[in-house]
Amino acid sequence: MNKKNQRDQTDQRFQFGKNWEKFLVGLDDIQITESERALLEMVGVDSFSGKTFLDIGSGSGLSSLAAKRSGAKVYSFDYDPYSVGCTKELKQRFSPDDSGWIIEQGDVLNQGYLNSLGKFDIVYSWGVVHHTGAMWKALDNLSNLVSPSGRLFIAIYNDQGRASRRWKKIKRMYNHLPRGLRFVVWLPALVRLWGPTVVVDFLNAKPFHTWKNYGTNRGMSAWTDFIDWVGGYPFEVAKPEEIFAFFRKHGFVLEKLKTCAGGHGCNEFVFSKSIGSK
């Protein structure tokens, strides 16, 4: 796929930053603390003190903020200007005068831009590169940003085969529809994805318990994540073994894996550079 097809399909690309703007309105300290806890736990450290942290596709800025609160020197970038704005807003709220947190608009597919960044102790990209339109190229690019003793933490949509191909069509349809008609896509998807859980919660005499407590999942919002899922296009997927094989060839060792149990979510991977890798 050429660069024009990768990045110029503005009529089909979901506006992630617009979705994150709504998320920030209700963001609270509990969600921020949970994001920080989940990040440190997955990487397997108590803090990021003295570490450099690169957030590729910073989105709302929540993970960048969590890394900053954990002691890291943070560099955040996103392709979407609205996402850049969200990240800058969080910095303004919680760390306005901190020179150790840099935020830019950037593209993980732009090799020249990435070459200017250097290398980082922790390279983080959660649920981002599968929306670039060139996932494997993006993964190849970001693999070069990890320092020799560093870690790479990524999350990639799970390949469900036929179900993933069906979701891709749904996502494309959502982005083609006028904003006022998008409910014809998200409403049945909401029933499909959340209906069984809501029923179980009612049967357990805990109405909407799972929805209300979704913030314990990395500090995220149920509604924001749902719209992100239904509208998130471009859309690519990978099997866990494909990601493992790809990074093994690039000189990485798998440290931790958290799967979505074959579902429609993301598989999470933490890799470290193997001895002798550049």
Image (tube, rainbow, N blue to C red):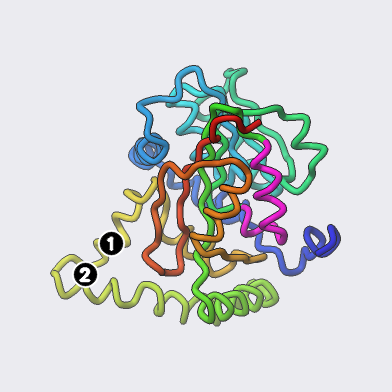
> Which residue is more in the foreground, 243 or 70?
243
Establish if 222 lies above or below 197: above
Q: Secondary structure at mark 1?
A: helix
2 and 1 marks in contact (CB < 8 Å): yes
Q: Position of residue 24 (x, y in %)?
A: 50, 45
Q: Label 2, on which residue?
A: 201
Q: Which badge, 2 or 1, comes first in the chain's sequence?
A: 2
Q: Position of residue 155 (x, y in %)?
A: 51, 52
Residue at 55%, 35% (x, y): give it. 273
* Magenta-drawn segment: 129-144
Residue 210, numbered circle:
1
Residue at 39%, 41% (x, y): give it. 42
Residue 49 lies left or right of residue 208; in this view the side is right
The reply to whether the magenta stretch includes residue 180 is no
Q: Position of residue 217 (x, y in %)?
A: 36, 51
Residue 140 in sight here: yes
The reply to whether the magenta stretch includes residue 133 is yes
Quadrant of the image containing the C terminus: top right
Establish if 204 lies above or below 128: below
Quadrant of the image containing the N terminus: bottom right
> Which three-letter amino acid code belongs to the residue tagged 1?
Thr
Q: Position of residue 2 (x, y in %)?
A: 84, 61
Q: Secondary structure at mark 2?
A: helix
Residue 81 in sight here: no
Residue placed farthest to the front in the image? Answer: 276
> Which three-letter amino acid code belongs to the residue tagged 2?
Asp
